[in-house]
Image: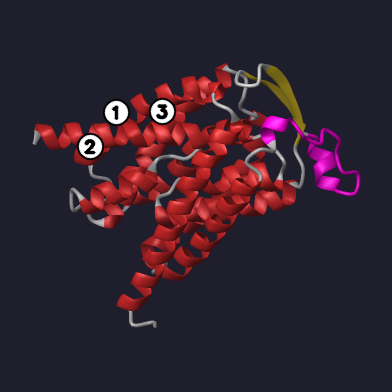
Amino acid sequence: MFIDILLLVIISAFAGLLGSLVGIGGGIIIVPALTLIYKVPVHNAIAASLISVIATSIAGANKYVEQEITNIKLGMFLEISTTLGALLGALLALVLHGWILSIIFGLLVFTMAIYSYITRAADDSNNFNTEFNTEDKLEKLISIKDSFYDLALNKKVEYAVHKPLSGSFVSLLAGVGSGLLGIGGGIIKVAAMNSLMKVPMKVSVATSKFMIGVTAATSSTLYFLSGAVDSHYVAPVAIGTIAGATFGSSIMNKFKSRFIKLLFTAVAGYLSIRMILKGLSDGMNLNIF
C-alpha cells in the first residue's frame, strides 16, 4: 500500500513538473496513470486530476506572478469564457457521452501542436507586434500591453495582446475540454494565447497556470457533488503535483522558448492522438461506426 502511494506521488510530481513547463495541469499523465495502473474508474480519475490541477496552479502560478511573467489582466479576461466552458463541460461529462467532442478536441489540439512546432523559433527572435489593431474594437478597448524579463535571452521582452475575441472563443472550448475530459484546458489556452493572440510562449505558460486552477475548481465542484472525488487518490496526487509544479515554475524562465515550444508540441501531439483514439474507441463501443 505504501509503495503504491509513493509511486503515485512520484508520478504526480512528474506531472506537476511537466505542467509547469508547458502551462498545463498534468491531467494527461494523472488520468491514464490512475485508470491504467490503479484501475480507478475514469470519472473518479478525472475528478482527482481536476483537484491536482487546482494544487499545481496554486503552486506554479504563485512563482510566475513573483517573477512578473504572468499577465493577470489577460488571465482574468479569458477566465470569463473558460469558466463558462468548464461548467458546460462538466455537465456534459455527467449526462452525455463525449466521444464526438473527444475527437474534435483532439483535432484542435493536434493543429495547435503543429503550429507551435512551425513557430518554435519565433519567440526567441523577439518578433512581437506591440501596436494594437485599430480595426479591432475589442482589442483596442481592453488594450493589454506588458513586458517581462527573459532570463534565457537576458533581455526585456515587450508585447501586446491581439485578437481577444478569437482567444476568448478558444478559451471557451478549453473550458469545455477541462470539464469534459479532465485535462485542465491549459494545453489549448497556451496555444491560443501564443498562436492567436501573439503572446510570448513563456507568458502564455505562466498565464495558463494562473487560470487553470479557477477553471478546474468550477468543474471539480460538480464532480464533488456527484460523489466522484475519492480522497484516497486525491491526497497523494495533490502532494506530488505541488512539489513538481513548485520546482518546474522556478526553472522555466531559464529555458529558451524554442525548447518549451518543442516540449509543448510533444505533449500536445501525444494528448491529441490519445483524445482522438479515445473518441473513436468510445464511438465503436457504442456501435456508432
The local secondary structure at tag 3 comes to: helix
Q: Which residue is mark 1?
A: 239
Q: Is residue 50 above or below residue 273?
A: above
State how far apart marks 3 and 1 are (Cα): 10 Å
Instruction: Identify which residue, 251 or 179, lies in the foreground.
Output: 251
Q: Position of residue 32 (x, y in %)?
A: 30, 51
For the residues labelled 2 and 3, say whether their Cβ atoms are less than 8 Å apart: no
Q: Which badge, 2 or 3, is on the more N-terminal residue?
A: 2
Label disc, if present, on residue 245 of the rendered structure: 3
State how far apart marks 2 and 3 are (Cα): 15 Å
Q: Which badge, 2 or 1, is on the more N-terminal residue?
A: 2
Residue type at mark 1 is Ile
Instruction: Identify which residue, 124 or 52, lies in the foreground.
Output: 124
For the residues labelled 3 and 1, say whether their Cβ atoms are less than 8 Å apart: no
Residue 145 horizontal side relative to residue 63, left or right = right
Q: Which badge, 3 or 1, is on the more N-terminal residue?
A: 1
